[in-house]
Image: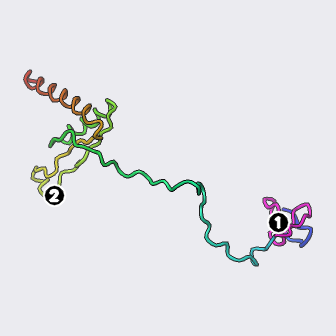
Amino acid sequence: MWICMKCGTKVEDSFEVCWKCGTSYSGAEDPDFVPADEAGPIGDLKLEVGKDKPEEELPGPPSDLVECFATSDLMEAQFVADSLVGEGIPATLQNQRHGGASAGLGLVLYPPCVVVHAEDWPRARDWIEHYRQRQLARRAAGR
């Protein structure tokens, strides 16, 4: 704490000038200082960062998602989505819940499906085709 040389006000050490009169610790007076009680409202401060640049819009959700795999088995759909991600193909699961009151009856109104970006669809289709061939081979072998 220090005491202002001009007005005698006690000032916290964190302040460089007296909050009441604007005088510094060393006694230098700021001719432009206006106490907060006498100052008018500051008004709305607007952020002017990058003012010379055009405003950039945030990207929206991807509009190029395509369904690459659908099944009534939620676990299988999750397995396929996870496997595609493991292969470096961004994929996500949609319709993860069975819909409506009929879900209790075992009916699936909206089967779970795996979606990928359109540009990844050929790779996803190849992986899924290979996956289905392995399933058929297992069934044929009686596993």
Image spot of residue 90 (x, y percent): 33, 37
Looking at the picture, how far across and down is residue 58, in whole percent? 44, 53
Kind of element beneath mark 1: strand
Q: How many marks?
A: 2
Q: Quadrant of residue 49?
A: bottom right
The residue under the point 90% across, 64% down is: 28
Q: Tell me which amino acid carries mark 2.
A: Gly
Query: Which residue is drawn at the image coordinates 76% and 78% (left, top)?
Result: 38
- For this view, does 51 lie left or right of residue 103? right
Mark 1 to mark 2: distance in Å?
A: 68 Å
For label 2, the crowd category at 10 Å Cα-Cα, with few meaning under 14, some 14 to 19 and many 20 or more, is few
Residue carrying label 1: 11
Observer-nearest residue: 57 or 94?
A: 57
Question: Which numbered marker is on residue 100?
Answer: 2
Q: Which residues are magenta?
A: 10-32
The quarter of the picture where residue 44 lies is bottom right
59 is higher (above) or lower (below) than 11: above
- The quarter of the rendered structure image containing the N terminus is bottom right
Which secondary structure lies at badge 2?
loop
Instruction: Please say whether residue 14 is one of the residues in the magenta stretch.
Output: yes
